[in-house]
Image (tube, rainbow, N blue to C red):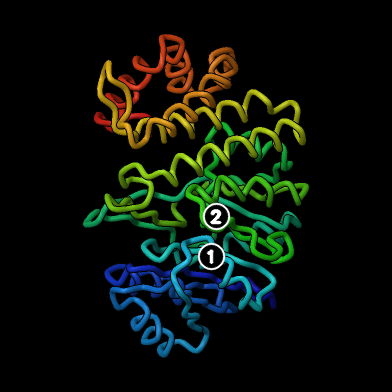
Amino acid sequence: MTSGDLVSVIVPVYNVKNYLEECFASVCAQTYGNIEIILVDDGSTDGSGELCDELASRDDRAVVVHKDNGGLSDARNAGLRFARGNWISFVDSDDYISPVFIEVLLGAALKTSCEISAVPFGTPFKDGEPCPLAENADLHVALKCLPSDAVQRLMLYQALDTGAQWRLYSKKTLGADPFPVGLYYEDLASIYKIIRKVDYVAVIECRALYAYRLRGDSIIRQGYKHIKGESAIRIATELYSDISTWYPSLTYAVASRCFSLCRMVFAQIPWVFSKGPSCEFANDSEMLWEVLKMHRKAVLLDPRARKRERLAAAIAYLGQDAFASFCHLCRRLGKMQ
């Protein structure tokens, strides 16, 4: 495709030395060549920072930003401050992208005159598994231009992922420091606010553009910490308030998403049947339980809510102990994460 638009690809980096070179190579191999690659070393301690410098020396489109550790959101925000492009993409440093990733997303945005383009999800894979991606931009896949409220609905019902990394944004839609620092689940806290700034989003029905690595040591899969509960409660409170005010027709949808988030986090709290949560996390458990009780009726009555959430909402009426036992059983079985 022909376009003079510069695309800034921001890659936050923290202790991913084993994966970084594969990620960088996939960005360098883009068929759309007018890109800059911003590697943001977020205070890595495993040699990833030095590897960033080495990789950048191989491609004059790449620059490295070294900073103290501040987390994923802080690294993304830092990359944005250095970005010169009209368009912005984020790629997680343990993932990799199709060679036509930028070409397809930018082409979709320009064709539809949308300021954001997206794919619903990436393709998940585990280390050692093959994850073939699209190599041809002429994919003959469905391209939809959806109004922003329809996109919000899809995200709330988790039919379109909230991840920042499988989207392309015009720089002005992001603004300054769009990602909240110091929170877990930062994409859920930020993407809906970005989507609200636009009238339409171009959605490409193709998962084979982004390879999403499933890691056992990822933040989401780590054990429970206070910050997880604090983040979930803060995000659920703000998300429900904002969406129900901006889009009254999505009140049930946002209740479902808030319930799902808090259920997932609640399930991570250590729990002893008939005795309750670990004393260390008892207050967290009670606060999450209050949010779950607030939304369980709406979820149970919503025919559009996912079956797993409606089942969990029904069990929530049996009490906190029964709900906790159900959540922990599902987590051990690898269900309802």
Q: Secondary structure at mark 2?
A: helix
What x and y, as percent, mark residue 114? 73, 55
Task: Give me the residue at 37% from left, 79% from top.
Answer: 49
Task: Give me the residue at 36% from left, 49% from top.
Answer: 124
Q: Is residue 145 left or right of residue 317?
A: right
Task: Give me the residue at 30% from left, 31% from top.
Answer: 278
What x and y, as percent, mark residue 23? 38, 69
The quadrant of the picture occupied by the N terminus is bottom right
Locate residue 85: give its quadrant. Answer: bottom right
Which of the two discs, 1 and 2, labels the residue nearer the N terminus? 1
What x and y, as percent, mark residue 302? 59, 17
The quadrant of the picture occupied by the C terminus is top left
Residue behind mark 2: 164
Question: 93 and 189: which one is in front?
Answer: 189
Residue behind mark 1: 74
Q: Is residue 306 left or right of residue 223?
A: right
Residue 213 higher or lower than 11, as above or below:
above
Between tags 1 and 2, which lies in front?
1
Q: Is residue 66 left or right of residue 32?
A: left
Amino acid beneath label 1 = Asp
Q: Secondary structure at mark 1?
A: helix
